[in-house]
Image (cartoon, rainbow, N blue to C red):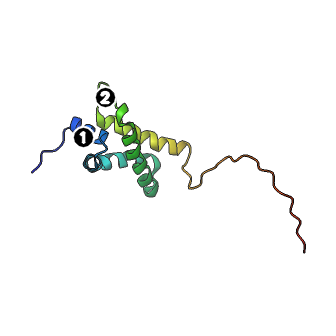
Amino acid sequence: MRKPLTEAQLIREIKKRSEKGFSVLYDLYAPLLYKIIWLSVKDKELADRLLEDTFLAIGYQINEFPFQHKGFKLWMAGIAKRMALQHVKQPLSDTVQVDLPDFPLPDFQFEF
């Protein structure tokens, strides 16, 4: 039987983009992070989506984790809470608004 990873080992695995690291991370922390998100949004589908976004953010921001300031769990909880609060302030949308430059349209003549 394998010894569980220490927090420092887990962080190193995530920094290496290790599938094992992300799997362990999810197994250990998904329930806690989901609860934090759900308490803010109170919607299962949205909480699922925000949980996924939270783990992506953790992966992208792992090199910014301040070892000397606070624990890893608290740092991730803060990311989850910010994800949820951002949604509460500005809901996610399935559509994306893109500003396109104005293009001159050719003159069309329709004959009926």
**Residue at figure coordinates x 40%, y 40% from the top left:** 60
Task: Provide residue 99's location: percent of width, then percent of height.
Answer: 68, 46
Q: In the shown orientation, is residue 66 left or right of residue 105?
A: left
Please state which of residues 6 and 51 is positioned toward the viewer in this rendering: 6
User: Secondary structure under badge 2?
Assistant: loop
Per the model, the C-alpha gap separating discs 2 and 1 is 16 Å
Query: Crowdedness of circle 2 by 10 Å Cα count: few (<14), some, many (20+)?
Result: few
In the image, is 106 to the left or to the right of 87? right
Nearer-N-terminus badge (2/1): 1
- Residue 54: give its label: none
Mark 2 vs mark 1: give the one in front: 1
The type of residue carrying mark 2 is Lys
Q: Which residue is mark 2?
A: 70
Q: Residue at x 33, y 28 (%)?
A: 66
Q: Tell me, yes or no, if residue 38 can be seen here.
A: no
Residue that lies at the very extreme toward the front in this rendered image:
106
**Number of marks in the image?**
2
Please name whichever residue, 90 or 24, is drawn nearer the observer in this view of the structure.
Answer: 24
- Figure check: 65 above or below 52: above
Left or right, 84 with reference to 67: right
- Disc 1 marks a residue whose amino acid type is Leu
Quadrant location of residue 70? top left
SS assignment at label 1? helix
| Horizontal and vertical percent position of residue 82 | 45, 39
Q: Quadrant of the C terminus?
A: bottom right
The one nearer the camera, 30 or 18, is 18
Q: Residue placed farthest to the bottom in the image?
A: 112
Q: Nearer the viewer, residue 107 or 81?
A: 107
Res. 86 visible in picture: yes
Q: Position of residue 55 (x, y in %)?
A: 37, 46
Q: Is residue 98 left or right of residue 31?
A: right
Residue on which the image places disc 1: 10
